[in-house]
Image: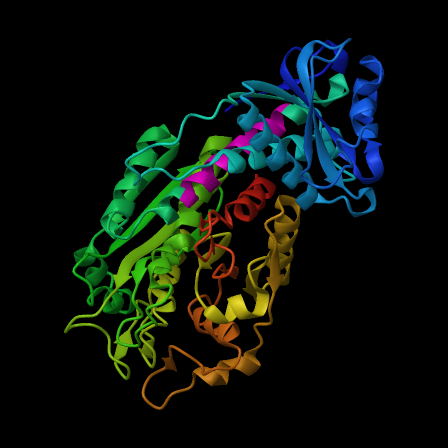
């Protein structure tokens, strides 16, 4: 969709539809009250007739209202005013977009940004979340379908702001919102592709294609298995040897500034399919193991978002990409492998393979002398049990970095929850036969996975984000699929670094 910012009297706005909010108990928002007054009470007439009570996501259209320049007004429910929050705001945007597409509306003016529940930057954040939520509502995965859905009517969205001095904030909200939404949608698309399409080779091709799209500021290179052998990435290659698909190590570098700045490095787990190896996963739900590359997809999305927003930062994205399959060469429980760092690992569970490809990528990240390193991975089922689908798990020994990421999650409404990374847990990785084991037993599985990765990040400012519960929606319903998280969280973090 195309987006623009608009101001001026609401009764003078032109177009198909004007969107305003109504809180529960039939309380008009400020914008809705202005529209109602200009239309001679047209909105209150519908409300009083029982057509709208303000429940979250409820919608009602008022056709041909007198005294207004638009053909119709869409009232959308905002829920209880005392419980008004970002989630309810985005639900309202989603409901409005779906309702207008069903009604055949081509262009709309959203007058909801001033109601955004934030004390500071409310217009910027309101406009930004309007764009993000609208794009998310309009997303459809169709790449592998023979019949495409009909084009959605809504093509143009204007984000209204009340004061002329708010124009810069509104325009910035559109630019950032569209950039984040584009990156998140890209991550969703990669995640939703089947594993026979989205192979490590395909991901490498996508990185180069994205680099060509964004010109000289973004470059991409793809290392093959020979390159990885030369770098002594024995841990990553041990996972790859079980598959006929060749592994790729993808390096994307975005330079949005000519200033010499230490880069922020994002490292994403790119397991394009995970059988579990010899420690085989159960058959039910194994189709969802195509989503095991959603950490890598998140890095693709965050790099794309930064390029779309033209952030003045230096950013590196690293994606170790492979499959975890079973053949005569596949890892066996009890095998010992040597990582790029020189540390040895006893593989007690071949299904704990994500950390085996991330550790070499984290070691590779050292060459950039990074300002910070953040790895993102669908790493542990234990994280799903601990936090469910609402919050990603966050671990770091650097309090300042952890706080920056937590704050970015709150602003972007892509939240994380910090788990401890105390040295007390490290002993669970002890083994008689190598420097460490790749699993630490049933207890605190998410934390011991973080402890494992921490052994490859000494001296670096580092954080680990476990998105096993948030990167996709499981089950068989219409919502099943990749979410594109944590692209909004990462994007907000990068905005804050600019």
Vertical side of 476 occupied by 351: above or below: below
Q: Is residue 224 left or right of residue 114?
A: left
Residue at image position (52%, 60%) is 463
Residue at image position (32%, 69%) is 283
Counting the numbered discs, the total is 0
Residue 336 in magenta stretch: no
Q: Is residue 420 left or right of residue 462?
A: right
Residues 152 and 231: in front is: 152
Residue at image position (35%, 53%) is 319
Provide the residue span drawn in magenta: 171-188
Magenta stretch: helix, strand or loop mostly: helix
**Residue 273 rendering spot, x and y as whole percentages:** 30, 59
The colour style of the image is: rainbow
The answer to whether residue 84 is visible is: yes
**Residue 249 rendering spot, x and y as whole percentages:** 28, 53
Residue at image position (42%, 86%) is 430
Q: Is residue 421 left or right of residue 437?
A: right
Position of the C terminus, as image quadrant, is: top right
Residue 185 in magenta stretch: yes
């Amino acid at each position: 969709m195309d987006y623009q910012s608009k101001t001026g009297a609401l009764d003078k706005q032109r177009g198909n539809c004007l969107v305003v909010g109504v809180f529960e108990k039939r309380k008009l928002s400020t914008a809705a009250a202005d529209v109602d007054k200009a239309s001679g009470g047209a909105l209150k007439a519908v409300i009083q007739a029982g057509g709208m009570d303000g429940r979250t996501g409820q919608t009602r259209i008022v056709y041909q209202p007198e005294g207004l320049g638009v053909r119709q007004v869409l009232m959308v429910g905002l829920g209880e005013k005392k419980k008004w929050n970002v989630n309810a705001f985005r639900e309202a945007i989603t409901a409005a977009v779906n309702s207008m597409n069903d009604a055949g509306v081509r262009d709309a003016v959203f007058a909801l940004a001033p109601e955004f529940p934030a004390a500071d930057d409310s217009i910027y954040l309101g406009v930004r979340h309007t764009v993000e939520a609208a794009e998310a509502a309009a997303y459809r995965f169709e790449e592998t379908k023979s019949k495409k859905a009909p084009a959605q009517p809504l093509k143009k969205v204007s984000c209204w702001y009340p004061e002329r001095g708010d124009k810069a904030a509104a325009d910035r909200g559109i630019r950032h919102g569209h950039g984040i939404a584009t990156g998140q949608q890209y991550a969703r698309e990669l995640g939703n592709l089947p594993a026979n399409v989205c192979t490590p080779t395909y991901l490498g091709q996508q990185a180069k294609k994205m680099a060509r799209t964004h010109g000289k500021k973004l470059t991409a290179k793809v290392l093959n298995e020979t390159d990885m052998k030369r770098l002594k990435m024995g841990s990553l290659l041990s996972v790859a040897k079980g598959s006929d698909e060749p592994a790729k190590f993808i390096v994307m570098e975005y330079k949005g500034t000519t200033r010499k700045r230490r880069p922020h490095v994002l490292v994403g787990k790119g397991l394009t399919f995970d059988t579990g190896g010899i420690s085989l996963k159960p058959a039910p739900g194994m189709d969802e193991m195509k989503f095991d590359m959603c950490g890598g997809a998140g890095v693709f999305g965050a790099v794309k978002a930064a390029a779309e927003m033209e952030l003045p930062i230096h950013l590196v994205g690293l994606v170790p990409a492979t499959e975890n399959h079973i053949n005569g060469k596949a890892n066996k429980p009890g095998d010992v492998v040597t990582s790029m760092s020189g540390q040895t690992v006893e593989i007690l569970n071949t299904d704990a393979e994500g950390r085996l490809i991330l550790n070499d990528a984290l070691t590779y990240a050292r060459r950039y002398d990074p300002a910070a390193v953040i790895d993102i991975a669908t790493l542990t089922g234990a994280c799903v049990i601990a936090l469910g689908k609402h919050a990603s798990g966050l671990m770091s020994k650097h309090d300042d970095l952890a706080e920056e990421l937590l704050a970015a999650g709150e602003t972007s409404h892509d939240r994380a929850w910090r788990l401890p990374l105390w040295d007390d847990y490290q002993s669970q990785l002890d083994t008689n036969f190598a420097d460490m084991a790749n699993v630490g037993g049933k207890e605190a599985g998410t934390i011991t996975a973080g402890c494992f990765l921490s052994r490859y990040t000494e001296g670096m400012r580092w954080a680990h984000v476990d998105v096993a519960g948030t990167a996709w929606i499981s089950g068989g319903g219409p919502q099943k699929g990749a979410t594109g998280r944590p692209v909004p969280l990462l994007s907000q973090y990068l905005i804050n670094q600019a």
